[in-house]
Image (cartoon, rainbow, N blue to C red):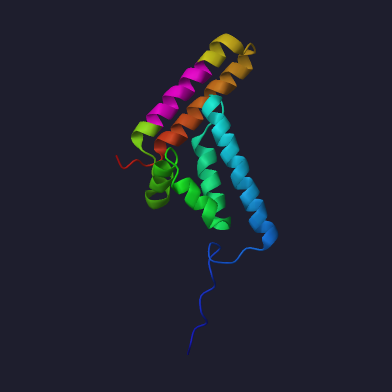
Amino acid sequence: MDLPPPLPTAAQRPLSPPVRWLLIAAGWLSLVLGLIGILLPVLPTTPFVLLAAACFARSSARFHTMLLRHRAFGPLLTEWEQHRSIPRRTKLWAIALMSLTLGSSIVFFVQPIGLKWALAAMGVAVAAWLWRIPSRN
């Protein structure tokens, strides 16, 4: 008895043009937000760049390759795509900068005590999530 061929996975199925263009737009939006996050300490860079790479991997080989060859983002993205890990140094820098900016916001800029606690809880949650991602080095 012959079995039917396996169904293609989501990554192998061809995309309809509207879905492809939506993924390209989402990738560029994520990349722009990631670039803004370099300048604004409250906005994270790494998750947006990873999201952009994921969108481009499904929709545009050209844009995906452009990101992988980027001098700053390429090594991080390659590490993520090949090993699903983030370098320990990158995690430590991200947590330290996030702690510094959230701490200064809590102390100097935010007035309501509930909002201070919410920012602190958000910072702890993001730091814990980031720390639990594997590191190879």
Q: Nearer the viewer, residue 95 or 26?
A: 26
Give left or right: position of 78 versus 67.
left
The residue depicted at 51 percent of the width and 48 percent of the height is 53
Q: Position of residue 49 (x, y in %)?
A: 52, 41
Q: Residue furthest left?
A: 137
Q: Position of residue 47 (x, y in %)?
A: 51, 39
Q: Nearer the viewer, residue 21 or 7?
A: 21
Instruction: Examine the rendering and report whether any part of residue 57 can be seen.
Output: no
Q: Residue furthest bottom?
A: 1
Task: Residue 99: say if magenta.
Answer: yes
Q: Position of residue 104 (x, y in %)?
A: 52, 14
How many labels, in total? 0
Give left or right: position of 39 versus 21.
left
The residue depicted at 40 percent of the width and 34 percent of the height is 131
Q: Which residues are magenta?
A: 91-103
Task: Residue 67: say if magenta.
Answer: no
Q: Quadrant of the C terminus?
A: top left
Magenta region, main secondary structure? helix
Instruction: Examine the rendering and report whether any part of residue 53 can be seen.
Output: yes
Residue 58 higher or lower than 131, as above or below: below
The residue depicted at 58 percent of the width and 56 percent of the height is 59
The residue depicted at 51 percent of the width and 34 percent of the height is 45
Residue 127 higher or lower than 100, as above or below: below
Q: Residue furthest right?
A: 18
